[in-house]
Image: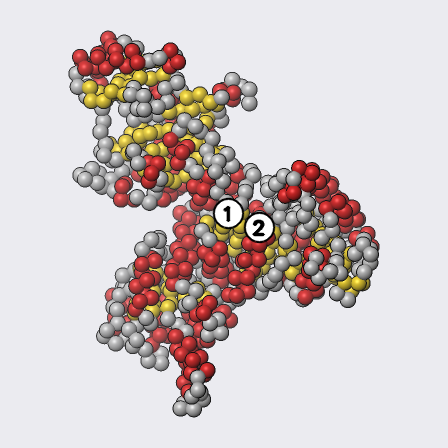
Amino acid sequence: MTRTLSEAESKALLSPFGIPFLPEANVTSSGEALLAGTELGYPLVAKLCGDSIAHKTERGLVRLMIRNGPELEHAVDDLLGKATTEDGEVSVLVAPMVEATRELIAGITIDQQFGPTVVLGIGGIFTEVIVDVAIRLVPITEIDAAEMIAELRTQSFLDAFRGEPEVDRVALVRILLALSDFASTHPDLVSVDLNPLMIVDGAPVAVDALVEVDDRSESGAR
Amino acid sequence: MNREMNVGRFDKEHFDALFDPRGVVVAGASTHPGKFGFVALHNILSSGYEGNVFATNRDGAEVLGRQTLRSVSDVPTGQADLVFVCTPSASNHEVLSQAAAAGIRAAFIASAGYGESGADGAILQQQLVELADDLGILLVGPNGQGLVSTPSSLCAQIVAPNPPRGHIGVASQSGNFVSSFLNLARQSGVGISRAISVGNAAQVGVIDMLEYFADDPETSVGLVYVEGIPDGRAFFDRLCAVTRRLPVVILKGGASASGARAAASHTGSLASNDRVFDGMCRQAGAIRASNLFEAFDTAALLATQPPPSGARLAVVTTVGGWGVVTADAVADTNLDLVDLPGDLRETLDALLPPRWSRNNPIDLAGGETKDTVADVLDAVVSHPEVDAVILLGVGIQSNQARLEREGAFFPEFGLDRITAFHDRQDARYADLAGELSIRHDKPVLVATELAVGDPSNAAVAAVRSSGRYCFPSADRAVRSLDLALRSAQWRSRRGLPPETGRSA
């Protein structure tokens, strides 16, 4: 059986490997949320977070553009109220709202023939329509990572764009290497999604993370 | 069961026994010209093989005028290194044991009735491999079509053709793809070192052959066809080791539906089998071709010309339209249709009429006198800011010469002299392309549809006799050059020395 980890748990696992995430707070009440909101600064995003919640957007469990305390209180109460018993233990992730015109997608997936692979693609709602993607087997080198980026067909997507600077390719290389390292050290891994990987002032930032593991190997029954 | 991955189980001696045997035994030689056992013996005897040839036949019948032996046990010890097995699968355990007793170290099993035929066949196949392992025999197949080894003039296969000698090493999971590559070798004159169909790949597979090719002085490029790869990770690791020593061109058939294991992830839905295979090839530095012709074109280029040391391409053409189409083809590649350096433009100004293109593609604008094409080509290839050259338009004059020789007015009206002149000129351009390529250590590709339209054309024939490949079209030349460039760039980024084409 495979199991998805909560967004908070996924990020906590990936963060030490050097994946850039936004500062955020994991709260269980609107009171806690208000304290965090003051520290993080508005506007904010709130997302329901739990082990079994893999597709938040599809379930309407994301609140965007929260501008002040009352809106935050309302959003957190509403999200906690939407949790079902199947969701298990839940919390709410509160994070600064960032906007980006460009999104990438990156992650790890296990190929049946070749094993763990690192994947980089053009992201956004048309990801699966455009399918502009580069794949390598774990582990990758810095040269492999740079070649993955250069392999994307839509190179102009990575250049300076509508007043935004070009994408920081060095930072992108570091993310791909971090994913590869993470996969190398986690044999129980089934998949990692960094989706979206937003381009904020040229810098890639993972706004969401989903780690999926194999329970059998985790319990030592490999 | 396919056991593609048996790392380093056999030494060079076993592969030498397979590709350069002192003698060959055809087990199951048949008197019937329609049977594999007849065809295999026929092909070995007809290819100029100089080693000992033995054949066995259950009844001891005469085949192709030769007395057969009743069993492999009758082969004198030490007289043969390879047994080519055409006997029914039920007999082959005995054949292998007798072969080992006669000192034979390699077996090619053409017989069918193994893993490809169902569960019973799979068991038989596994037993055959276990026996071969015990006997220390290198076993290729079963259900394979055979092998070719031109340095030994050995054509031990149940299919045609017998290709010319050269430096491309072919290994394939499909026997018919071996034939396809050999047909193109025969047609183009760019030859083969070794070619082998691994059949069911029971004991050894394509990657074992590539590892042998990587250290084979006769082979300067590997050309492979694969469908399934059972242990992808080991294949990748071994391929990485091979590509450091030998350029490898891969053609893959079959994109199976099953892909990534993950269900929850979006990245998983992007990672189809074919895209993973593509990434694996790029990471390993192997060249993935998208079809049969592209695969052979590229292998032929790598086997006969130096790799490009950079992206700067110059196109020399006697006809405008071909230059335009070639420029279009370059647009999708890593190649750079270089702006002509000022000094080169000045040199060409002095050689050409004012109406020439004055840029790249270098369109001679029909301004040729006797030495123009040769002088322009020399100036372009020798320029230090040009890394590769494609020459278009050769063969036009000798094509007209052919029409005149076949016409009603030949040889009067001076036609005999002018046709001979045209042929000489076209041959001279083609020869010069080869000479300049060697002198300046740069690829100089000649492309004309006459390569298929009229292989007897003087230009085409001259490219062929220089040992090079005449590309059938400019866009195919561009595509192969681009793949060769990408391979060279892959090496250079990793600090590896350029491929030298050891035997070319």
Q: Out of B70 and A221, give the one closest to the viewer.
A: B70
At 51% from the left and 65% from the top, the residue drawn is B188
At 23% from the left and 32% from the top, the residue drawn is A100
Which x, y percent locates residue A87? 37, 14
**Which residue carries the number 1 mark?**
B253
**Residue B245 visible:** no
At 27% from the left and 38% from the top, the residue drawn is A167
- Chain of the residue where label 1 is placed in the rendered structure: B
Q: Is residue B366 above or below residue B101?
A: below
Whether discs 2 and 1 lie on one chain: the answer is: yes
Are the residues tagged 2 and 1 within 8 Å (C-beta)?
yes
Q: Is residue A8 above or below residue B321?
A: above
**Which residue carries the number 2 mark?**
B174
Q: Is residue B306 above or below residue B236?
A: below
Q: Please tell me the numbered disc located at residue B267.
A: none
Amino acid type, callout 1: Gly
Which x, y percent locates residue B99? 77, 50
Lateral position of residue B237 relative to residue A31, left or right? right
Please tell me which of labels 2 and 1 falls first in the chain.
Answer: 2
